[in-house]
């Protein structure tokens, strides 16, 4: 009798040219990833060659029961690290049967901004630092913490090693390798300040691909934690009190910023971001007011400040950028549960298209 693991790991290419495509989309809450699979006659590498599909939007909070069909448009393909072979993960966005983007489809608006000639010419690069917390499944308390109790205070855990400092490394490392296998430009991982909290970085990615890659990496993380029997939380302040929150710091540069004289371009862009601070905060994630308190390496939510090497600022410019006179900056305001389509496109719109 074959073991279940033997069947899960069957190599389909030994017996068929058919592949499995896992269609992935974002549900009604804006953070609930959904997916379902279908069989295709052979390998596909271009999203435009994939068939559109549909699902019951009334079951995801995205359509009424009497007119529940929502159409999936394939937008980006990644290799499937779970099924492997020629099988694929497909990032989709969502439309009505008439072809109108549904209200929760944030990718559609982002793609319009990123296809603007003024934005295309500047080749916007993004690097997103995704923080998250691993929770024990049945008690929803951070991994490694005593049930209902607390570990020692912060200090030893950031980039820490050892059984009393780092919990969940097997999940983190599995996710790292799975993302690299999938073709996601994941650039690193590290343990974070609060125990049970970790971070991975995606980028540099250009334009809309930053959102596609971050959503794909979140999907892979959710699947791995499902296997491990652990819950992943993107809550920006999962534990109240003297503990760091979880953000999604977004590093950004344009061609003009990366060229000689770029620091002046950076300063002008930061000035524009300051003028639209409230609009950005409103779009940077639910519950962010619990995180942006002016403590724990954040600026107060109602205050916009920037500085060089200042982790208590809204916008941080690195020492290397200041020294070179060109480079990138980091928007430290986005929460861990932000939508990368919204944040990346909004930064591009404010800095490149908006006229104060």
Image (cartoon, rainbow, N blue to C red):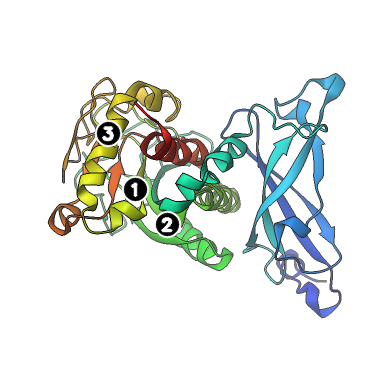
Q: Could you tell me if the residues under marks 1 and 2 are in contact, i.e. CB atoms within 8 Å?
A: yes
- Is there any visible trace of residue 32 in the rendered image? no
N-terminal-most mark, 3 or 1 = 3
Q: Quick check: 66 above or below 20?
A: above
Task: Report the Cα–Cα distance between label 3 and label 1.
Answer: 24 Å
- Say which mark, if any, is on residue 141: none
- The correct choice, above or below, for 232 with respect to 121 in the image is above
Quarter assignment of residue 105: top right
Mark carried by residue 251: 1
Left/right placement of residue 153 relative to residue 282 reads: left
Which is nearer the N-term, disc 2 or disc 3? 2
Query: Where, quadrant-wise, is the C terminus in this rendering?
Result: top left
Mark 1 crowd level (few <14, some 14–19, many ≥20, 10 Å Cα) = many
Give the labeled residue for mark 2: 203
The local secondary structure at tag 3 comes to: loop
Point out which mark residue 243 bears: 3
Image-based side of 16 in relation to 251, left or right: right
């Amino acid at each position: 009798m074959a073991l279940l693991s033997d069947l899960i790991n069957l190599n389909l290419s030994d017996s068929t040219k058919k592949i499995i495509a896992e269609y992935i989309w974002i549900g009604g809450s804006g953070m609930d990833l959904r997916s379902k699979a279908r069989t295709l006659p052979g390998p596909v590498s271009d999203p435009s060659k994939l068939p559109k599909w549909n699902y019951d939007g009334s079951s995801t909070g995205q359509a009424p029961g009497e007119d529940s069909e929502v159409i999936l448009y394939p937008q980006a393909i990644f290799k499937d690290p779970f099924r492997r072979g020629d099988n694929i993960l497909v990032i989709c966005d969502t439309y009505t049967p008439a072809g109108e983007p549904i209200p929760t489809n944030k990718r559609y608006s982002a793609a319009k901004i990123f296809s603007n000639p003024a934005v295309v010419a500047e080749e916007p690069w993004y690097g997103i630092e995704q923080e998250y917390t691993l929770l024990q499944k049945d008690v929803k308390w951070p991994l490694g913490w005593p049930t209902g109790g607390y570990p020692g205070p912060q200090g030893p855990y950031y980039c820490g090693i050892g059984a009393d400092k780092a919990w969940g490394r097997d999940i983190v490392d599995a996710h790292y390798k799975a993302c690299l296998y999938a073709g996601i430009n994941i650039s690193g991982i590290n343990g974070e300040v609060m125990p049970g909290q970790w971070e991975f970085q995606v980028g540099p990615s250009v334009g809309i691909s930053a959102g596609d890659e971050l959503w794909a990496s979140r999907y892979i993380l959710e699947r791995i934690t499902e296997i491990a029997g652990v819950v992943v939380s993107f809550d920006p302040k999962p534990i109240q009190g003297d503990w760091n929150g979880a953000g999604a710091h977004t590093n950004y540069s344009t061609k003009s910023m990366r060229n000689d004289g770029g620091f002046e371009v950076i300063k002008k862009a930061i000035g524009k971001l300051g003028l639209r601070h409230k609009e950005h905060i409103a779009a940077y994630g639910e519950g962010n007011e619990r995180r942006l308190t002016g403590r724990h390496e954040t600026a107060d939510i109602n205050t916009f400040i920037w500085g060089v090497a200042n982790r208590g600022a809204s916008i941080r410019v690195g020492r290397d950028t200041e020294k070179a006179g060109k480079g990138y900056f980091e928007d430290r305001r986005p929460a861990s549960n932000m939508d990368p389509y919204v944040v990346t496109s909004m930064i591009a719109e404010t800095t490149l298209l908006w006229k104060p």
